[in-house]
Image (tube, rainbow, N blue to C red):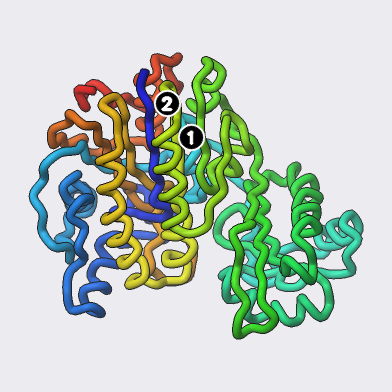
Amino acid sequence: MPRAIILVIDGFGLGHAPDAKAFGDVNANTFANLAEKFQQSKNRPLKLPNLSKLGLVKACQQASNRNLAVEPEALSNGAYGYAAEISTGKDTPSGHWEMAGVPVLFDWTYFLDKQNSFSAALIAEINQVTGYSDMLGNCHASGTNIIAELGEQHIKTGNPICYTSGDSVFQVAAHEEHFGLENLYKYCEQVREILDPMNIGRVIARPFIGESSADFQRTGNRKDYSVLPPATTVLEKLTNAGGTVISVGKIADIFAHQGISIKTKATGIPALLDSTLAHIETASNNSIIFTNLVNFDQDFGHRRDPVGFGEALEYFDVRLAEFLNQMNDDDLLLLTADHGCDPTWPGNDHTREFVPVLAYHNRIESINLGQRNTFADLGQTLASLFTLEAMDYGKSFLTELKF
């Protein structure tokens, strides 16, 4: 029986999607634009030999008709393509649910106002239910910036820092010691219940430590409170059929813990990759190991750091060799993303882009998968791989892999 390893390079787009105009994202291209800035800063192109051999550069060139500032490497093995999203939003849950075969075809509710994002009535209800006198923030913000701006006031007053973004999300930052981690989680759970009728996708607990704006830093104890996917995902279908789904990082939270057998928390790209490799070593057949590499999006995309993004890609490329060497003959490795997050783009929100679709197994040749019309092609491919009931959306590319 096979195993599938899915690595989500969070926020890694390959060029603006066909409907990017509706999102204000025409000409966004996470990969090409960060590579150009990287070369300008480092006086050399990106070095991504393993990803290039799998077809990543070729996929981006096909998706965007752009030449890339990446050291050339001949294609050798691996299937490569690029996928458009049919979900209505460019947020994390929509992207992940669609890749698991369940696109989001309804509209989320968003907090659209950049300042005073939450209404007085909502704030009053949250304060009444949670028992806090007030909240700080109440705006669109970068998580790291708002902690630096309001962290000291938060410690002094004891009031949580609440903010949002272009996503359907309510985020809460609080100090792990002064506010308390369990108090933060309880607060977010209470807010989640209040927001359920409003169709807000996620409430996110964002704990941090430090004693002043000079040393505040977020910790790995983030927790996402997501609504349930609108239909049965391929993850649930596999677990219902007796298989195993292993979550590494925030995958379990994104899927509201539905269809998840084993959950592993890890902080930072090295630890996330280490944990995934450890599961590859021990996971049984008929398993999916599903990892989200959040730091690409969180630390470099949203913070608009193209050079840091490029350095992280080079590190990931080196570590990718360990995955290729450790795979069994009936293992399938899939690399993709949930949306774009172009670090050269105005603002700090996600960007509506094609995402990579790379696939590898030990006997594969170089295969061009071309444009995929929905992320759900990945979920349909997994359904085919594990001989599950077909998903309602997507087209399997398993036969093209000659798996």
Q: Which of the numbered marks, if any, corresponds to residue 278?
A: none
Instruction: From the image, tell me which residue sits under label 2.
Output: 393
Asked if the residue under mark 1 is in contact with the one under mark 2, i.e. CB atoms within 8 Å, the reply is yes
Give the image location of residue 50, x and y in percent.
Answer: 20, 50
Q: Quadrant of residue 138?
A: bottom right
Q: Is mark 1 on a helix, strand or loop?
A: loop
| Mark 2–mark 1 distance (CA, rounded to whole Å) | 8 Å
The 10 Å Cα crowd at callout 1, few under 14, some 14 to 19, many 20 or more, is many
The residue at 31%/31% (across/down) is 332
Q: Which of 163 and 329 is in front in this view?
A: 329
Q: Is mark 2 on a helix, strand or loop?
A: loop
Give the image location of residue 279, x and y in percent.
Answer: 45, 38
Whether residue 3 sits left or right of residue 42 in the image: it is right
Q: Which of 244 and 67 is in front in this view?
A: 244
The residue at 36%/55% (across/down) is 12
Res 59 seen here: yes
The residue at 88%/65% (across/down) is 132
Q: Which of the numbered marks, if any, corresponds to residue 103?
A: 1
The residue at 21%/31% (across/down) is 362
Q: Give above or below for 7 relative to 381.
A: below
Q: Quadrant of residue 197?
A: top right
The 10 Å Cα crowd at callout 2, few under 14, some 14 to 19, many 20 or more, is some
Whether residue 27 sits left or right of residue 110 in the image: it is left
